[in-house]
Image (cartoon, rainbow, N blue to C red):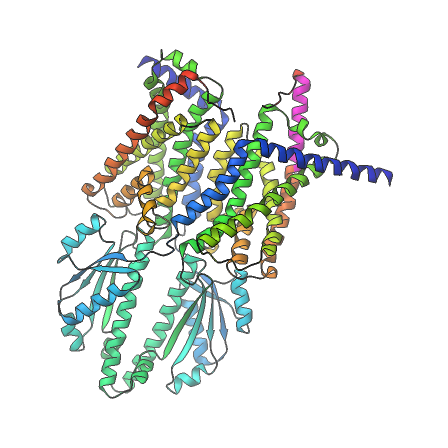
Amino acid sequence: MKNLFKLYYKAKISFWNTFSTEWKSIKSDKAVLSTFLSVALIILVVYTYIYSNQVVKEVPVAVINQDATKMSRDYIAMLDATEGTKAITAYTDLQEAKRAYYSKKVEGIVIIPKNFEKNIRSGKQTAITTFSDAANMVFYKRVLGDVSTINGYFSAGIFIKKEMAKGVSLTQAQQNYTPIQAISTSLFNTTSGYATYMIPMLTALIVQLVLLMGIGLLSGSRRETITTHTNFPRLLHKGGTIPVLLAKACLYTAIFMVIIPIQVGIVYTLFAIPVRSSLFLIYVFIIPYVFSVVFLGITISSLFKRREDSIVFLVLLSIPSLMLSGLSFPVEGFSEFYQLISKLIPSTPGINGFVRLTQMEASFLEVLNEWNHLWILTLIYFVLAAISLKIRVKKEAQLLKLYSLKPNKRS
Amino acid sequence: MKPSLRIAKREIALLFNSKSVFIFAIVLPFVSILFFNTLLSKGVARNLPVAVVDLDHSAISRNVISQLSAAPEIEVGFFPLNQQKGEELVRLGKVYGLITIPQNFEADLKSGKQVHVINQYNSNLLLPGGLEYKAFRKVIGTISAGVTIEKQRKQGVSIQQAMVNYQPIVSNNRVLSNPYTNYSYYLNTGFLAMFFQIFVMLTTIYCFGADFKYSKGNKLLNITDGNLSAIILGKVLPYTVWFLLVGIIMLFSMYVWQDFPFFGNKFAVLVGLLLLIIANQSYALFFIAFSNSFREALTIGAGFAAVSLSFSGITFPIFGMPTILQWLSQIFPFTHFFELLLDQSQRGFPVFYSLKPIIILVILSIVPISLGWFKLKKLFSKGVFNHSI
């Protein structure tokens, strides 16, 4: 009983010592501080600003009017009135329009054929030819989407007019044209805005990026100066890694409890990105996320010899982990190997859960899977981090014994 | 030439001595090529799960469901009992959309009333949400058209005429550049090229920064008798050559191994690639010249290279950005290289139209290093960064 109490007491001391040592190193390391500030806030603001127009409007499209009738002009006016495209009729033939496309003045070409009106009036089918450039999917979708919508409306208009000429009422004619009406309701991000889509993902990714960078920098400099074991003396004792690791995780969680409200409060409000969850739930959700990332950071930081190395590796890691989260390209399209890898990265459940919580109105029960997933990752990386820390401290101790060096105090 | 040759030799020896430079100059570029080429190997998203709430349970409603399942983009995987359960599935992320067939669907349809099919799709996930929306509209549109045409046939109209009546205007869509709308063609080109330039940028900063970190700037000046251009040439040129090779392998992996469409001029792409490398090295030197520490140069360089993806217009077109950012996007070499690469590969434009990006890349190669030249000279004679952290 006495031993147990002693153990608890030592662990408690070690916990608070680690907490204050780590906090002091963060405070005194200008690099870490600037990483936290610049990445967590500046990068987020810049990215949000890039996407702040949300959707692409008025994509210029060349319309070649070979018919030059009233009906063809009506068609052009309808196309021009759409949100996505702007009809440019300055080009008389395909060659001219092609040159404009080559020099990026237009992003697509629409041809209204000769006898457009005549064919329609005589009950023949007529085809609108569209050239849309799928090298850029955003333009492609805009142009093709708007042209097919207008084609549909125009066809429907003609059909309904014909029906009405037979003496059918307008509503009846409309119903005749579409006996089954497709009603689509877009949920959550109703305008398919790009910022609303991107920024919550980025916020969650930034948690991982910043933490890994900060931990990598700190541990790299401790490694350069061989001070890991002097900073955290309990590490050399049996079971000493547990309070050290827990203290670090708690400290970073506390830091993010300050950063997240700033991000959500300022950036989201500034750019009108919805938040559909309470701060409390976000806090509860990010605890295991921060924990697992911290332990992952400690695990992989044993790979870095210099403090600068961590920056390089983590910048490179961030985009693949965004891809693997499955929010940009659906997970169903990945091979099983990548699906497995994606499950080992904390950002996958982290981003998914955060986005669903803040954007998709999910209740906490509905992100419970991700939350549990994060706790499992926390456990796995906790063990790995403990092992890697232990190995490193022992190595350092051996190194110092061998050369009987005094550890340099970092300036 | 002699002193720069000596520096080049030293640089290559350093490369094989230092584990970290070796890893991200030699190993990681190939890892990234392998990763992106295999990650999106399918390229087109298929069989996205959707849920259907069938409140009608009739022959026609079952027919609608089977037609929905037959669409290549979606797959009906869940049949929740009511709308609440279905919406929960959407929030759980198990399905991308929820389709509801209302009660009396068949009875109303047969009695000539207009009926509705409701689709709630998750537009927070742009790509799968959009695909689901499109597939749903197509399937229901086709079924609805079938009913209309059938009605007309009963009135004695021929099937051909009924189809023409239904759709007097048809769309004849020609998809240029990427006819299968393969996302791999679209995303891989951007991601691979972007990663490639991150490696160029970071390697250059690293090979200079490591020398300054350990106060070797004077030593280098001694080797070349104070000639700065010889140092830069000796240190940078081996990497220029190496990354040109890596870049060619990268292009090879896309256009030969993966068989991406390539209709343009190969030579123009190679010139662009070389200029992209040089421009990035020029920017790297600029960042080193104006940074206070190795870490700062690396952070700025990495940040610059990483955000150039968003500024290149691949995720969101430059055309749609705020005006200030449209101007800002022009200072990134990647923006111009990416334009050149797309124009000369998938789009197959005449080379004349790619002269503009080439000229801008040349300018972007010269300007940064000229701006940083004197600062760089000072830094070398000092031999070490202002700060060590």
Viewer-proximal residue among B149 and A284: A284
The x and y percentages for residue B52 are 49, 71
Viewer-proximal residue among A94 and A335: A94
Does the magenta-highlighted stretch encompass residue B298? no
Q: Is residue A322 left or right of residue B142?
A: right
Looking at the image, is A153 positioned above or below residue A383? below
The x and y percentages for residue A127 are 21, 67
Residue A139 sits in quarter: bottom left
> Where's the C terminus of chain A, which quadrant?
top right
Residue B69 sits in quarter: bottom left
At 60% from the left and 59% from the top, the residue drawn is A364
Extreme-right residue of the structure:
A1
Main secondary structure along the magenta-highlighted residues: helix
The x and y percentages for residue B32 are 43, 39
Does the magenta-highlighted stretch encompass residue A387? yes
Looking at the image, is A178 positioned above or below residue B311? below
Q: Is residue B134 visible?
A: yes
How many numbered marks are there? 0
At 53% from the left and 57% from the top, the residue drawn is A358
> Where's the N terminus of chain A, which quadrant?
top right
Viewer-proximal residue among B155 and A354: A354
Q: Which residues are magenta?
A: A386-402
Looking at the image, is A114 positioned above or below residue A400? below
Q: Is residue A336 visible?
A: no
Q: Is residue B120 left or right of residue B226?
A: right
Residue A143 sits in quarter: bottom left
The x and y percentages for residue B366 are 28, 29
